[in-house]
Amino acid sequence: MDIVIIGAGAMGGLFGALLAPWARVTLCTTNTEHAAIISRQGLTLTSMKGTICRQRVRIVVDPDPEAIAADLVLVCTKARATATAARTALSVLRTNGLVLTLQNGLGNLERIASVVGTSKATAGITSQAATLVAPGHIRHAGDGPTRLAAGPGQSERVEAVAALFNRAGIATTVSDDVDSLLWSKLMVNVGINGLAALLRVPNGTLARVPECGQLMVQAVEEAVAVARALGIDLPYEEQVDRVRQVCVQTAENRASMLQDILKGKATEIDVINGAIVARGEEAGVATPVNLLITQLIKALEATVDQRIRGDGDGNHVHAPVQRNHFGGRTFFQENPCNRKN
């Protein structure tokens, strides 16, 4: 199977490394430093056990539709890049290909489907966790189930993707209820991402420290109330416990929103906690905790260049934020390890 992964950050890189021994994988990134290192020495993956492997994988910065064709496109970008990713997916997708979003939040599937067509777009959720340690280096920070949605006429293609994922060690099942799937992932993101970013703590702290856990429970319970009001089919009584379980399973992981805040990047707050606020307004359900989390994250984004940090001696200094600068070259990695895992 030919797979193109758009977004080669933590999650895209993890899936690329795990799938590369079993399929022809092409990573697409806008980060030229990341691409250059992977091109030169391979994609470095640190496993949950601490072992390190450098995986052979192709990586491009400017995808050429004449040179790349995909049976499956995985979209692993931030939500703000979904429209661009969808156009790239359309340009490389084979006639009977499938575009699968593994992104956070609500609205991504609809944006992708509007570009590639409903029959070629579907969504999935995953409890896999990863951290981008440095350009070219991914750390596998948590292992958990992956679920893919199969819409009308998609069952055969989605089942084939699930079978491939399972061969690659990514435990995967298939569901026919995309709304339930996306909202179940949203619950986890609502409980973890914003709070981890605000408190600057790894996931496990939210479940371990009572003061953190109380906020997490309040945010999730608001999301549950909104989902119930909208008629989303979920086992509502299980949601808080499930979020706690994910925190424990990914205890050392830095949530994606925390990684964004630490790097001075824009976050996905609008499609996570912000989405609960928006849907709550539509349904007439109050969401004060999610509103406050959303407002605080937006305030962090707005003041990134004014951040005060300690220098270790009790003094405070303004720390400049490093930002990526992107270009347009293409790279191809020829070797390192091809061990199947």
Image (spheres, rainbow, N blue to C red):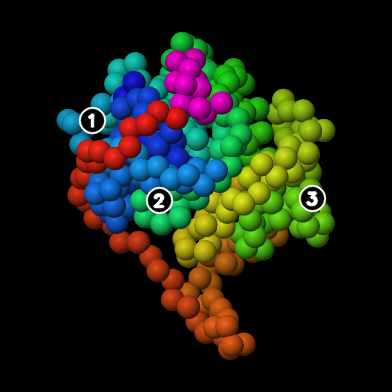
- State which tag comes first along the sequence, 1 or 3: 1
Residue to which mark 3 is pinned: 218
- State which tag comes first along the sequence, 1 or 2: 1
> Horizontal placement of 206 versus 62: left or right?
right
- Residue 67's x, y, as percent? 18, 31
Between 115 and 220, the one nearer to me in the picture: 220
Marks 3/2: CA–CA distance: 35 Å
Could you tell me which quadrant the C terminus lies in? top left
The nearer-to-camera label among 1 and 3 is 1
Q: Is residue 310 above or below residue 158?
A: below
Cβ atoms under marks 1 and 3 closer than 8 Å: no
Residue at position x 62%, y 87% in the image: 314
The nearer-to-camera label among 1 and 2 is 2
Observer able to see residue 80: no
Residue to which mark 2 is pinned: 137
Q: Which residues are magenta?
A: 159-171
Marks 1/3: CA–CA distance: 46 Å
Residue to which mark 1 is pinned: 68
Q: Amino acid at mark 3?
A: Gln
User: Please, what is the dominant secondary structure of the magenta stretch?
Assistant: helix
Q: Residues within 10 Å of mark 1 (few under 14, many from 20)?
A: some
> Horizontal placement of 68 versus 225: left or right?
left
Mark 1: secondary structure: loop
Between 263 and 298, the one nearer to me in the picture: 263
Residue at position x 38%, y 46% in the image: 44
Between 338 and 282, the one nearer to me in the picture: 338
Residue at position x 79%, y 43% in the image: 221
Q: Residues within 10 Å of mark 2 (few under 14, many from 20)?
A: many
